[in-house]
Image (cartoon, grey):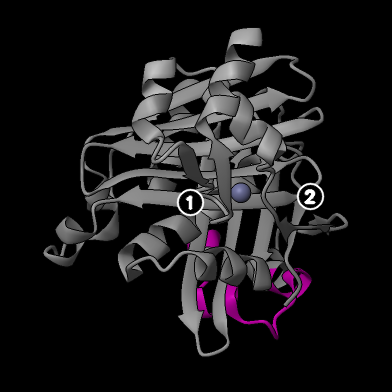
């Protein structure tokens, strides 16, 4: 199954959708981290939602989705560039996770989910925030669009680990405000019908590499009429570099830098890709003073 995201329209003018299928990309991200099953599931959901929502990226830049809570899973973050390069990581307290049997979403506790759009080259920045409420990150996203953007949104999402590795799939439908359907049908009624059709999509269908996107959408919405646009490829990749790690350290208080140093060296690990950076404490302090 190729890793892609694609936009589609239902023939009704007020309905727009996105479909994401992830195979090798999701597996590569999750294999990099040896997370417990519940954390891996939450991370997979964050990655799929990020790919769905990256349509919020209207210019060249980076879209990020970040959940922060007071539970055993303190943070989940995924980001994606307009070129389709995606990465993700989680931070959590392993002991608390092993001793609990609650639903993965409850592991986040109370907190918020933030959507950030950063335009390349230090341009515009947009941030939206919604409380962590309901039964899943997916529900939080639906709630955000309804509350903050007045856009009715429905999402079906699934991720699972197979023998060959992790696979994920997700479909999002949105009712674009301000557009009126040409037929006489009540828009609210037809929205509800479309939502019922979306919910009939099974996890098995979303995750089956033998069912291409076009067929999956046809199965669900053939009565509504679908126009599927060319898919964009997605790839896994990290943007960390020695320069970025150095500038992060140089921006810190020298006393804080000293707390990270051992025998004059600082070991920094990128939480996204696991790459380690070995830096000299004196270099950082000297460069920091020059800057
Ligand atoms: Zn990295």
Q: Please say whether residue 71 is one of the residues in the magenta stretch.
A: no
Which residue is denoted by mark 2 in the rendering? 11
Q: Vertically, is 124 above or below 78?
A: above
Return the x and y of residue 48 as percentages of the image width and height: 56, 55
Q: Residue at x 47, y 75 (%)?
A: 160
Separation of disc 1 and disc 2 at Cα? 38 Å
Q: Quadrant of the C terminus?
A: top right
Q: Nearer the viewer, residue 79 or 152?
A: 79
Numbered badge on residue 89:
1
Q: Does the magenta stretch include residue 199?
A: yes
Left/right of residue 66 with respect to residue 118 in the rendered view: left
CB-based contact (under 8 Å), mark 1 and mark 2: no
Q: Which residue is drawn at 56% across and 46% down?
A: 278
* Res. 195 visible in picture: no
Q: Which residue lies furthest to the right in this view?
A: 230
Nearest the eye: 241 or 290: 290
Specify the farthest residue to the top. Answer: 290
Callout 1: few (<14), some (14-19), or many (20+) C-alpha neighbours within 10 Å? many
Residue 134 vs residue 106, the one in the foreground: 106
Q: Which residue is drawn at 54% across and 17% down?
A: 251
The residue positioned farthest toward the front in the image shown? 263
Q: Closest to the observer: 287 or 238?
A: 287
Quarter of the picture holding the N terminus: bottom right
| Element under disc 1 | strand
In percent of width and height, residue 3 lies at 73, 66
> Where 284 sits versus 162, above or below?
above
Residue 175 located left or right of residue 76: right
Q: What residue range appears in magenta?
A: 198-216
- Residue 154 location (% of width, % of height): 51, 48
């Amino acid at each position: 199954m190729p890793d892609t995201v694609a936009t589609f329209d239902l023939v009704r003018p007020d309905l727009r959708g996105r479909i994401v299928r992830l195979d090798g990309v999701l597996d590569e991200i999750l294999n990099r981290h040896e997370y417990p099953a519940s954390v891996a599931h939450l991370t997979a959901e964050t990655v799929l939602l990020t790919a769905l929502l990256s349509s919020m990226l209207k210019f060249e830049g980076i879209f990020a989705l970040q959940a922060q809570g007071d539970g055993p899973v303190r943070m989940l973050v995924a980001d994606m560039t307009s070129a389709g390069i995606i990465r993700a990581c989680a931070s959590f307290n392993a002991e608390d996770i092993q001793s609990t049997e609650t639903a993965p979403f409850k592991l986040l506790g109370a907190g918020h989910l933030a959507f950030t759009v950063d335009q390349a080259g230090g341009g515009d920045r947009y941030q939206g925030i919604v409380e962590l409420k309901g039964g899943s990150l997916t529900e939080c996203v639906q709630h955000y669009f309804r509350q903050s953007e007045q856009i009715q949104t429905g999402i079906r999402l699934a991720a699972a680990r197979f023998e060959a590795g992790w696979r994920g799939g997700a479909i999002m439908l949105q009712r674009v405000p301000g557009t009126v359907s040409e037929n006489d049908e009540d828009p609210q009624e037809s929205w509800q019908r479309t939502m019922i059709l979306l919910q009939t999509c099974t996890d098995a269908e979303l995750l089956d590499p033998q069912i291409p996107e076009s067929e999956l959408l046809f199965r669900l919405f053939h009565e509504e009429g679908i126009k599927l646009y060319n898919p964009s490829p997605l790839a896994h990749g990290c943007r960390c570099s020695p320069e970025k790690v150095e500038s992060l350290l140089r921006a810190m208080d020298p006393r804080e830098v000293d707390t990270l140093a051992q025998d004059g060296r600082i070991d920094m690990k990128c939480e996204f890709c696991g790459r380690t950076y070995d830096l000299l404490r004196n270099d950082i302090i000297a460069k920091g003073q020059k800057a």
